[in-house]
Amino acid sequence: MSRNVLKVKERKDRYKVCYMPGDDSGFDMMEGALVVLLSMDLPIDWVRADLGWCMWEKSVNKFGQGDPRCNTVPPETIDKIRSSDATLMAAITSKSGVKGFKSAILQMRQLFDLYINLRPAKTLPDLGSPLKGDPKIDLVLFRENTEDLYSAVEFHPLPEEMFNLHKGMERFRKMGDVAVSWRVFSSVGCERIIRAAFEYAKSTGRTKVHCCNKANVIRETDGMMKRIFLEVAKEYEQYGIAGIEENADATAMWLIKNPQDYQVIVTSNVFGDILSDEASQLTGGLGFAPSGNIGENTAIFEPCSGSVPKYAHQYRVNPSAMLLTSKMMLEYLGLDQAGQKIEWAINEVLKENRPKTLTYDILRDFRNDPDWERNAASTIEMATAIAQKINPSLTDSTLEDIKAKAREMCDWTKTFGFED
Ligand code: IPM
Ligand code: MG
């Protein structure tokens, strides 16, 4: 049996964790998360690395526009990720239409072959679901993370020989300007994500795995996914796990109608991108949506949300997504109890509902507070409330020290990378 890739390769007394504040509000959410994490006395040595739009700008300033060394990820960051036991990453900013710009996270997924994108969607009892009847949702989505339309094999303009490759291309000849993006699936790629989903179901006592595909239309790629899924599913029948294959459009609908029927979903990259955002809305929105990019040797944990540039450095964003992402990372490192404490503490703060402990998104979208703008807590205020739940004996002066340390660790005026 191969090892469980959802856990770090080697258990240690202390771990080296690379943290990356990203861009814009990414700094705020990372600082908030660190207020909690630093107050927990974890066996972790933190190493800062930078990536994203800030690094793109730095490299363009240094090397000049158009230089091939310009990138969103500096070599120093790649080294730090490689030499750490796990990486915790906040949101980054992407800008379209910038020549040569490549998303930092997409590069990391391919470079480190982070083939699993693990995206749980779980209702917190004291937040609930915006859906009618407040269903209890606890599902985990396994999104294939390196193939499909994310393979980045694209053509525009289309070379002449591409029109001759397949008779189906004939009708596009007269259409003039044509662009093609290849949807690439490999059987190895399908099998490893499907096995990861079933192994997870087995080890967590879940009884159903859904495979969302579109094999009724996209016969070769999704057909491959479906065939391998049904084969692997047979092996897991003996453990009382049912493999159910379903059309992805039906999944999108049933997720809204009967979300509690889903336990584990395995799907390809694009469908997973869409279904995970949908699932996050059923359980609290992007302010609570964690994710992990996991491969054989490397794991990068990042929330699903964007970097909300309009709120950059205003400390408005909810720290929960970053904290639930940290929980996933702690579980990866085998620090399960610490991870569970974080989730428990977030829920306690939601339950207590004290003034100035909940960020605007919660007051506006879940608590119907007409005065949400004025009553909203800052990222750091909410993080402080969570830290105090976990550690009620935190004294004022210790807390101030921790806040100062978190602030210094996420100083956005200093970035690291592209050094000489
Ligand atoms: C996600 C995001 C990314 C993706 C973007 C930012 C490249 O939407 O992690 O879901 O498309 O995978
Ligand atoms: Mg997405």
Image (spheres, rainbow, N blue to C red):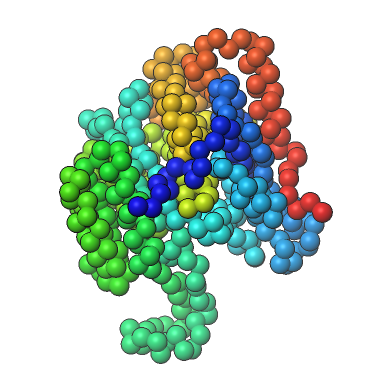
Q: Could you say where residue 314 lies in the image, as x and y percent from the top left?
A: 63, 31
User: Residue at point 29% right, 68% down?
Assistant: 224
Tell me: residue 389, above or below residue 329. above
Tell me: residue 402, above or below residue 327. above
Question: Closest to the observer: 412 or 117?
Answer: 117
Residue 261, by quadrant, is top left
Q: Could you say where residue 28 lies in the image, as x and y percent from the top left?
A: 61, 33
User: Residue at point 71% right, 30% down?
Assistant: 408
Residue 64, by quadrant, is bottom right
Tell me: residue 282, above or below residue 118. above
Question: Closest to the observer: 78 or 27?
Answer: 78
- Most distant residue in the front direction: 1
Tell whether 283 sits left or right of 133: right
- Whether residue 272 is visible to the viewer of this picture, yes or no, is no
Q: Could you say where residue 211 lies in the image, as x and y percent from the top left?
A: 27, 55
Q: Could you say where residue 299 lies in the image, as x and y percent from the top left?
A: 51, 47
- Whether residue 54 is visible to the viewer of this picture, yes or no, is yes
Tell whether 66 sits left or right of 14: right
How many marks can you see? 0
User: Residue at point 30% right, 38% down?
Assistant: 204
- Quadrant for the C terminus in the image: bottom right
